[in-house]
Image (cartoon, grey):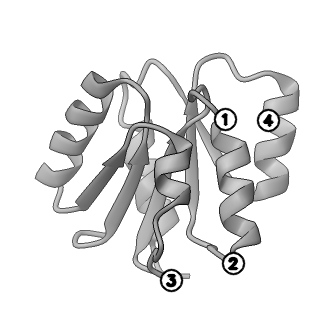
Amino acid sequence: MVGDSLFLVDDDAAVRRALKFAFELDGYRVETFPDGESLARCARLPADHACLIVDYELPGMDGLTLIEALRRRSVRLPAVLITTNPTAQVRRRAQAAGVDIVEKPLLSDALGRAIEQAVAPP
């Protein structure tokens, strides 16, 4: 929903800039992080009206490990995992964490649709 916040974690600066630009055009507030540790150090994340967009392949902790760590801190924001060719194990972990997967390359509007669904009121 327009006006919601997106917390984008991707180690590729070009991807961060492009997605931030595109989603800000759509009316989202976007904060970007180069790795999982940077977002994990965020002292305060909103309880609602926000979505996590997390790349799986990150330096340090992988994207699902980051989401699991945030869940242990009671951060229940919806999350979308972006990755290339996810393995069956990654798919199982994502499903167990309640995380949607959008596969790279991000050539369609699949990521935008997943975010719209994630932030839509129940």
Nearest the viewer among 35 and 112 is: 35
**Within 10 Å of the Cα at label 3, are there few (<14), some (14-19), or many (20+) other Cα atoms?**
few
Q: Which mark is residue 91?
A: 4
Seen in the picture, residue 63 relative to 67 is either above or below; the reply is: above
Q: Position of residue 12 (x, y in %)?
A: 37, 23
Q: Which mark is residue 74?
A: 2
Nearest the viewer among 107 and 58 is: 58
Q: Secondary structure at mark 4?
A: helix
Q: Is residue 15 left or right of residue 114?
A: left
Q: Secondary structure at mark 3?
A: loop
**Within 10 Å of the Cα at label 4, are there few (<14), some (14-19), or many (20+) other Cα atoms?**
some
Say how many tags the image has: 4
Q: Is residue 62 left or right of residue 19?
A: right
Q: Position of residue 90 (x, y in %)?
A: 79, 32
Identify the mark nearer the N-term, 4 or 1: 1
Identify the mark nearer the N-term, 4 or 2: 2
What residue does disc 3 label? 47
Q: Position of residue 28 (x, y in %)?
A: 23, 61
Q: Mark 3 or mark 4: which is in front?
A: 3
What residue does disc 1 label? 62
Q: CA distance from mark 3 to mark 4?
A: 25 Å
- Specify the amino acid type for callout 3: Ala
Q: Mark 1 or mark 3: which is in front?
A: 1
x 48%, y 38%: residue = 35
x 21%, y 34%: residue = 17
Q: CA distance from mark 4 to mark 1?
A: 14 Å
- Specify the amino acid type for callout 4: Arg
Seen in the picture, residue 111 relative to 31 is either above or below; the reply is: above
Q: CA distance from mark 1 to mark 3?
A: 23 Å
**Within 10 Å of the Cα at label 2, are there few (<14), some (14-19), or many (20+) other Cα atoms?**
few
Identify the mark nearer the N-term, 1 or 3: 3
- Specify the amino acid type for callout 1: Asp
